[in-house]
Image (spheres, rainbow, N blue to C red):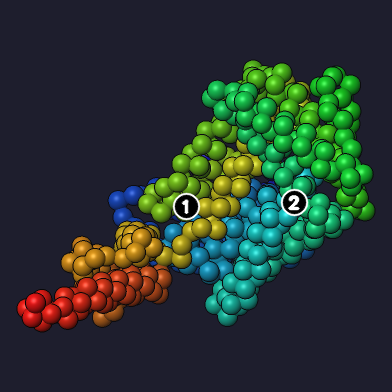
Amino acid sequence: MTDSPAVRIPLDPKEQPILDKLLAVRTNLELLKQDRSTYVKSQDVIELYDQVIEQVGELNHIRTTKRLEQNRVDTVLDDCFQLISLAYMTIGKNHEAPAVYAFVSTIKRLLDHLEEAHFYSSKDLESIGTQLANCRRYIDRGKDSYSPHLLTLLDARIQVCSETLQRLELAQSHLTPELTPKYDKLVSILRSLAGCNTRTKFPNEEIDEHLAQLKQLQEELRPYGIHAFESTGSKEDKLAEMVEKLQFTIANPEPAPEAKILIETLLRRNFLWVNLIKEKQGRIAPAFQQTYDKLLSIRNNLEKLSLTQAWSLRETDLWNYQRQLDRIDEARVDGNFIDAVGRPSELYEQRTLLYLLRKSYALIYQLIVSSEPVSEALLPIYNQLTTLRKCLLEVKKLGGVSSPRELYPYSMKLNSIDNMRVDGKFMIGDEIPDGQGSVTQLLEECFELAYELRNDAEDSSEADATPASENGPEVLAA
């Protein structure tokens, strides 16, 4: 395996033993995540975490006078922390400090891409801001439990993310409540148009629908003094946008662009993009076909994981995708994808490849956010209870059951799961996996739902029976 691209400087001979030990830890972590014959055990992960922290202490001691040095030791150390972080999620310790590392790394990538793209929605920033606040809370809670080496590193990374987030929020600060929904819609259309280029069959009708929406938005924006012409897709327009793109890339983020300029530029970019993708019809230049195929495969695999996450995802699997995406991202030159001979991509390939890259990072982010704080060992039980809860809620929504007998299958399943507990705990061998509270709470919710449905059914049966008993003497008297 090769490391992510990074500047290499000569390795201090004193650091060689540290590198060797970190490589051994990384190998053990990779073997741990690849072994599907058994669950990932907390003891194994914590032991490897302790070994990494020990090497961090040794490294800091050696680098007393060269704190900013970066060499292969640092890239392997990053791999180890990423794998340990995802392994902590696999064993259900999602809210522990080590689990924050991979999450913050993904957030950093997303924020960098949002800043580079220049156009993003307020919802993007709200979600990331919420998650950063959660990460800070997990770190504060772990101050007495985890190494200050790790906590200092995480705190610094979160601070970098927070500063980027503040710049992005400032860039949108001129948008009024009336303009924000229209701006967000334009961002959504731009992303959807980029996604159209990755379809097996080019969706001409969908492109036309987006064009109609753009024209409608253009009319709605006229009263605000916002105007943009519908681009003909001429070479002059494309050149103008390339110059504009370059300015956005190299310009100082201060001051924040005015709302009118921001929206007009976005509207114009959408019109230009419609003409360009209609011309290209999903055809990627041969020089970038390999990169496109690789990114498309990663995006598709991550989307499949999103659909089957509860049943098939082992969080450490995300590391392979992260590494591949990082290598592709870091191989760009001045933000551009380059071919085998160092030539930058054209606008169409650049936008399409960036869409796939950013979409893949966003999918990893969503998979991490939606990861349940339950050990892999308890996930089968947790998933069964989640399904039972959904079924019981659906039954309740549809008016309940007509007889308590209809609840027998649910009750039998719940009792069988409840009987798996030993002294109130779900045991896997001799181990008590993390996530006991989440599973127990879900079990109690299911029992409570079943109890409510049974009571409602019994009350309904008694109400139906009461008129019959009251009418009995009258019938006999007649």
Residue closest to the eye, 416 or 432: 416
Residue 221: x and y in percent read 84, 43
Q: Is residue 302 above or below residue 315?
A: above
Instruction: Say whether residue 221 is left or right of residue 415.
Output: right
For numbered disc 1, what is the local secondary structure?
Answer: helix
Q: CA distance from mark 1 to mark 2?
A: 37 Å
Q: Quadrant of residue 461?
A: bottom left
| Mark 1 vs 2, N-terminal side | 2
Q: Which mark is residue 233?
A: none
* Residue 229 x/y as whole percent: 87, 30
Mark 2 crowdedness (10 Å alpha carbons): few <14, some 14-19, many ≥20: some
Residue type at mark 2: give it: Pro
Q: Secondary structure at mark 2?
A: helix
Q: Which residue is mark 1?
A: 316
Q: Nearer the viewer, residue 436 or 191?
A: 191
Spot occupied by residue 12 in the image (x, y as percentages of width and height): 68, 52
Residue located farthest toward the front when viewing the structure as drawn? 478
Residue type at the position of mark 1: Thr
Which residue is at a point 87% across and 35% down the rendered structure image? 228
Q: Quadrant of the C terminus?
A: bottom left
Disc 2: which residue: 181
The one nearer the camera, 354 or 209, is 209
Q: Position of residue 54 (x, y in %)?
A: 55, 66
